[in-house]
Image (cartoon, grey):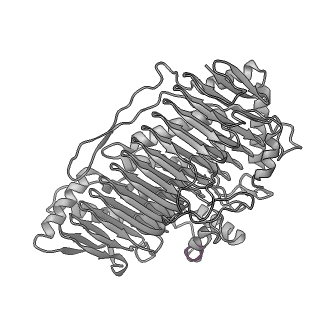
Amino acid sequence: MMLRVKALRSLLLVVLPLVVLALPLVVLALPVVCQPVEPVLPVKPVVTEFGEGLQKQQATKEFVASLQKRQLTSKFDDMRAFFGHRLDRSAGDKTFSDKTGNTRLSWFDWMMRHPVQSVDAADEFTRLVHTTAVREDGAFSKLVTIAATKLDAPLPTAPRTGRTAQGGTDVGLQTLQRAVQQVRQEYAQSLVPLTVAEREELQAKLYIQAAGPKAGAPRFADKIDGRRVSDLLEKIDRRSLMQAAATVSGLSEQAVLRQLTQSATRRTRGKAQAIVETPAGKIVFGGSGNNEYRLNEMADVCAVVDVGGDDVYLEGAITPIRPVLVLLDLAGNDTYRGEQPGIQGGAVLGVSLLIDAAGNDTYTADDIAQGSALGGIGLLVDKLGDDKYLGDKRVQGQAVCGLGVLIDRAGNDDYRTALLGQGVGGPLGFGLLDDLAGNDHYYAGGKYADGYDDSPGYNGWSQGVGVGPRGTANGGIGTLLDGGGDDVYEADYFSHGGGYWFALGFARDFGGNDQRVGSTRTAWDGSPRTETRFMRYGNGFGVHYAAGYLFDDTGNDLYFTDFAGVGFAWDLGITAIMDMAGNDRYESGSGVGACFNSGLSMLFDAKGDDTYVSGNAGSASEKSEYHPDEPHAYNFAYILDLQGQDTYPADIANNRETERGWPGGLVIDR
């Protein structure tokens, strides 16, 4: 049952404290250095150690030490056992209440059973993904390897990718043709475990069920059909699916793009386009002029390679007739526009890759687009330019059963979605948005009404969020990463570094002065909001059997949520905020770094003059209101601030330890 504002406020009056714990580690600061190399833009990270001697895992080590000092180790172990017991009761085909075990990922299970170690694992995971993304070559195939492991579909150490052809007069064409053929075979292999009837059923029901109810909540449309679709998705051979992702991602390598530039230039001299018939389908080469591609009218085209010009790409949905589509645009200020699901590096039961190498580009879509997938692979890489991404829902790095990735390597970019976008992982899905450089703006929400009757606002469910369709299936892995620049994040309910319903969510910003301003400031279409600004569950939260992690490496940052956010754990939840440097402000009306109804909340600030605005900062209740008959449903909250002259609520002071409610709630200021 979801949290009610009224109930929580009454609970908070009983003065419950916290223990917000913090994250560890030698962290990396990422100013990104760009050196233009035709036709690719390599981006190299500068890796530095943070904290002037701050040891790896210091925050988690100090949390364990605080448990020992207060003789709480056994109670914390009891809480972990309670978590494990609840996970066991719904494992596999077992169910209780609205909890099920289908589509559950083993990494999620491990993170929930190891709440302290999960913080260190989250730090390592987000750094690994980002440092991989900034590689000049081979980054995408390595990202696929990471994602495949997290999706319980591990690939060989060196997965096969789209290797360049050797010799010949048209090497680029040969490489592209061979890659598309191989991807089609690997995707077909992923469906072999399903009968023909099951494939047809999945094709008919998947999008309808994943689209959910009209209210915009992240649920499947019907519990029975939704469970059936989930069962069919589990039968897919995900290793073959991820191998298809590794293969198609090889086309993003510099050597391949150079070869394709040569092939396209040679074939389009003196004409706008050239079409080549291949066993994989037609390949269209576009010249340096302004071309328009009506992709739905080109159903027999498997790939487009355009060398330049301000081009327009319309629609381009993946279909059973065309399960694989590759779009490579090497220069120009391009426009991508469409309304069908599965476009712009998006796929419904198929594989799609879009690479735009240069230019200030605009992407506009409705659903399943811009690096998004349902039962497939959707990949988008934009290498250079100030770009605009606009999509209604399930866009900009979203996945259900598969991989959805958007990598933007440079530029001051604008991302806008209304629901389930910007790094979202649904059942068996790995969704990632990683923007490597620039002053970026992220917007999520402003359109679909929230599901609560006791507070105003809109749904968001975006920006590094793992989410499961409650009562039907478990969720996946959602990740939002930003490499540098002064960024602005605005989002509505359930957004930014959070997990809901058996899922994991991650958000991390590696550099710059960042503003997490809470709810969206306008409606989705830019008009004035009709709902009062109010953000519920945001900026670091884990709620209902889930975990969310929010890290920031440098800069003077703002974290704001009206209610149930800024490091908030609720009902078998885990959450951690780690800020490594800067003068930061943490503000929430219901408790910064707070925990209720069994869970763990951790907040670690390494240095800077920080401000904590909340009457319940660091609050945790000893017992659980949701689980009154469970003797081990404890709450632990831990705030650790290492350096600086900080400002707290009146009952918390600098340079001392303050218990908040019970010994399991603690604020430590150095």
x then y, percent, for residue 61: 62, 23
| Drawn side of residue 228 relative to residue 358, left or right | right
Mostly what secondary structure, the magenta segment? helix
| Drawn side of residue 306 relative to residue 315, left or right | left
Q: From what the image shows, is residue 363 above or below residue 669?
A: below
Stretch of the chain drawn in magenta: 201-205
| Drawn side of residue 565 relative to residue 340, left or right | right
Q: From what the image shows, is residue 343 above or below residue 566?
A: below
Give me the residue at 33% from left, 79% from top. Answer: 298
Residue 487 or 597: which is nearer the viewer?
487
x then y, percent, for residue 596: 76, 41
- Does the image show residue 38? yes
Quarter holding the C terminus is top right
Total residue callouts:
0
x then y, percent, for residue 644: 54, 22
> Residue 231 occupies which quadrant of the picture?
bottom right
- Does the image show residue 375? no
> Residue 540 occupies which quadrant of the picture?
top right
Give me the residue at 51% from left, 53% from top. Answer: 423
Q: Residue furthest bottom?
A: 297
Q: From what the image shows, is residue 101 above or below residue 604?
A: below
Q: Is residue 221 magenta?
A: no
Quarter holding the N terminus is bottom right
Residue 299 or 219: which is nearer the viewer?
219
x then y, percent, for residue 520: 55, 56
Q: From what the image shows, is residue 17 above or below residue 88?
A: above
Give me the residue at 52% from left, 28% from top. Answer: 25
Residue 584 or 113: which is nearer the viewer?
584
Q: Residue furthest left?
A: 270
> Residue 230 occupies which quadrant of the picture?
bottom right
Q: Residue furthest right?
A: 629
| Drawn side of residue 592 relative to residue 256, left or right | right
